[in-house]
Every structure is written in structure tokens, then in C-alpha cells.
């Protein structure tokens, strides 16, 4: 069995590759010329890296003709919400075109590849108080260009399943974190600031954005197990929430991180970290995914945050 991981050098991609290798699956992954390799350096000997620009249909077609994978975990994306306000067209083009090129190559070569599409809880966007925990049939009211790009990926996957019978499973993953999370994302950003304060590399002031948003955090290692199960046992064409079913404010998450350290800090709001519109609450119900695949989260949030803080302690 051969799996292709798009965006293998990224945060989730590197964990996905590790999971697949542990299962004994042959792993190939797409990278771009400028991809940073630090997350996969330790497994580079065990995986096949293929240079591919997903935005270029010819590049994707040639790659798919060579690789012909049984499974695709489509994780490559512009995934940082604030970037999508600065360059909305780039985010939408990147996230949508890459997926269309993959689907068109599958069609052209008549492959029976099963494809997992990394959709997002951001698609739900504006959520009313009576709509939590959010189920898959909730209306999608996206609040950022990134969220719109994920709605498009989600519905394109549905459409290619309906139109051409491509085996797709759409996973709407709520926030996820763990070691190697990019430093722009809130959990890593705060953990890195704390690690730097511990080492005396910066004054004891944590810069923050909106601390009142509520998010449902799953450990990335539980998430990649979910992606595997989605293709093992998920129903083709379906969408599934991947979430823990409990949430906390960003302030509570920060307090948890601080409780894992001895530093005493001041908290300072940074206006540049505020968003034109922020999703207030994302709290997911993953009962449908559990019923179809047996998945449930295993790693407690405290453990995830301890591992993340230790990751940054080793980096700064
Ligand atoms: N990044 C960041 N966010 C902050 C900060 N302070 C507060 N926040 C708040 O923390 C929340 C989480 O921000 P991010 O970690 O940037 O993640 P996200 O916007 O929720 O999106 C993530 O989750 C989605 C799934 O719901 C993913 O689809 C997306 O790619 C990303 O991983 C947001 O409400 C944001 O306003 C800060 O200093 N930095």
C-alpha cells in the first residue's frame, strides 16, 4: 500500500508520515523547492520526496502518473487565517487549484485512489450559541478568505465524488496542535514566547491577540490517526468533524501554558494580532466520526501543551 502526503514537510504532514511509516505503509510526499525540511529530516531516508507544485496542473499530472498512490492525504494548504486577509486570492487559488489538479489527475489516469481532504472547522465560522457542539449539518458561515477556501475544497470534494465517483472523505478538523506547530499559530506562539522568557531571551511580557475566542483543541497525533481511519472506515463522499467535544478560551489555554512554567509575566494586547472578524467559538461534535470509524481523542490537552512547550524549550 502506497500513500501520498501532500505538504509532507509541514506540521501535520510530518506527523502523518510518521504515523504511516509506523503502520508499515510506503510513504511518498510532495514538497516544493523552497520547502523547509526540518520537520522530516529524521525520516527522510524512509520516505520518497517528490518535488511538485500543486498549483501547476502539469506538475501534478506528472507526479500522479509516476506515483499512482492508493491513498492521498491532502494536507498541503495555506493554513494561517490572518495571511488569507493579506493575500485572499493567493489563499483561495493555492487551496482550491491544488485540489482540482489532484482530482483531475485521478480522473485522467482512471485511478481508484482514496483521498482524504483536510477541511476545517473554520468553515462553520459564525456559530450561534444554540448550535454548539457543532454537528456536520450546521450551516457554513465562513468569516475569512481562508474559511471560504476550505468551504470550496469541501464542496469540490463532494462534487467530484458525486460527479465521478472518486473516493473522497472530507475531514473538518477543529484546532489541533502539538510539537512542530508553526510559530504563527496561537498555541505555538505563546509557548515559544514563554520558552524565550524562561531563557532570558525576551522581557517577561506575553503579546496576545483576542483571548476570548473559544477553541476545541485536539492533539495532532490523534488527528493523523483520524485521517487514517477516515480512509479505512469512513463513508466515501461524507464529511466528518474531528474534535474533542470540549473547548476553552484562548486565555485559559495561555493560563495552562503558564502553569507549566515558573515564569511570571505581564500580558499585553497587541492590536496587530486582532482580526477583522474572529470566529468566537468552535466546539465540535465528532459523534458521527466516532460512530463510523471508532475514533476518539486519546491524548489529554495538558499533555499536548507540555509536549509543545518542551518542543520550544529545545528550539529557542
Ligand atoms: N495566531 C494567533 N492567534 C491568537 C493570538 N492571540 C489570540 N489569538 C486567537 O487564537 C485563536 C486561534 O488562532 P490560530 O492559532 O491562529 O488558529 P485559527 O485561526 O483558529 O485556525 C486554526 O484552526 C483551524 C481549524 O479551526 C485550521 O483550519 C487553521 O488552519 C488553523 O490551524 C483565534 O481566535 C485568534 O484570534 C495570537 O497572538 N496569535
Image: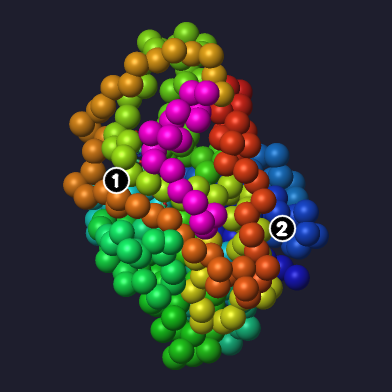
The residue under the point 51% across, 40% down is 181
Residue 180: image x %, image y %?
56, 38
Residue 27: image x %, image y %?
70, 59
> Where does the magenta region start and end?
243-259
Which label number is shown at residue 7? none
Residue 167: image x %, image y %?
57, 81
Q: Is residue 248 magenta?
A: yes
**In terms of image quarters, where does ligand 1 lie?**
top left
**For disc 1, does the CB lie below 8 Å from ligand 1?**
yes
State the separation of the CA atoms marked 1 and 2.
Answer: 31 Å
Which label number is shown at residue 20? 2
Q: Is residue 181 magenta?
A: no
The residue under the point 36% across, 21% down is 206
The vertical placement of 166 against 187, above or below, is: below
- The answer to whether residue 314 of the structure is visible from this angle is yes
> Residues at badges 1 and 2 in contact (C-beta under 8 Å)?
no
Q: Which residue is mark 1?
A: 82
Identify which residue, 20 or 304, lies in the foreground.
Answer: 304
Q: Secondary structure at mark 2?
A: helix
Amino acid at each position: 500500500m502506497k500513500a501520498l502526503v501532500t505538504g509532507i514537510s509541514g506540521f501535520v504532514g510530518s506527523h502523518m508520515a510518521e504515523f504511516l511509516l509506523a503502520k508499515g505503509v510506503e510513504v511518498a510526499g510532495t514538497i516544493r523547492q523552497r520547502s523547509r525540511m526540518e520537520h522530516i529530516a529524521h525520516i527522510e531516508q524512509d520516505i520518497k520526496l517528490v518535488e511538485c507544485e500543486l498549483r501547476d496542473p502539469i506538475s501534478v499530472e506528472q507526479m500522479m502518473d509516476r506515483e499512482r498512490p492508493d491513498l492521498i492525504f491532502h494536507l498541503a494548504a495555506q493554513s494561517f487565517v490572518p495571511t488569507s486577509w493579506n493575500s485572499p486570492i493567493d489563499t483561495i487559488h493555492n487551496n482550491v487549484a491544488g485540489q482540482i489538479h489532484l482530482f483531475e489527475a485521478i480522473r485522467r489516469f482512471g485511478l481508484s485512489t482514496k483521498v482524504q481532504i483536510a477541511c476545517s472547522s473554520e468553515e462553520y465560522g459564525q456559530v450561534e450559541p444554540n448550535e454548539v457542539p457543532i454537528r456536520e449539518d450546521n450551516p457554513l458561515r465562513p468569516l475569512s478568505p481562508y474559511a471560504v477556501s476550505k468551504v470550496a475544497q469541501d464542496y469540490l470534494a463532494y462534487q467530484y465524488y458525486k460527479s465521478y465517483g472518486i473516493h473522497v472523505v472530507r475531514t473538518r478538523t477543529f484546532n489541533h496542535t502539538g510539537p512542530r506547530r508553526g510559530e504563527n499559530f496561537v498555541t505555538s506562539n505563546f509557548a515559544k514566547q514563554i520558552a524565550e522568557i524562561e531563557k532570558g531571551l525576551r522581557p517577561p511580557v506575553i503579546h496576545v491577540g483576542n483571548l476570548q475566542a473559544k477553541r476545541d483543541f485536539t492533539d495532532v497525533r490523534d488527528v493523523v490517526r483520524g485521517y487514517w481511519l477516515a480512509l479505512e472506515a469512513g463513508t466515501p463522499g461524507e464529511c466528518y468533524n474531528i474534535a474533542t467535544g470540549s473547548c476553552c478560551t484562548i486565555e485559559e489555554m495561555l493560563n495552562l501554558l503558564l502553569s507549566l512554567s515558573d515564569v511570571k509575566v505581564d500580558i499585553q494586547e497587541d492590536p496587530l494580532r486582532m482580526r477583522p472578524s474572529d470566529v468566537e467559538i468552535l466546539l465540535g461534535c465528532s459523534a458521527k466520526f466516532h460512530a463510523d470509524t471508532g475514533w476518539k481523542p486519546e491524548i489529554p490537552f495538558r499533555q499536548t501543551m507540555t509536549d509543545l512547550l518542551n518542543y520550544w524549550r529545545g528550539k529557542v
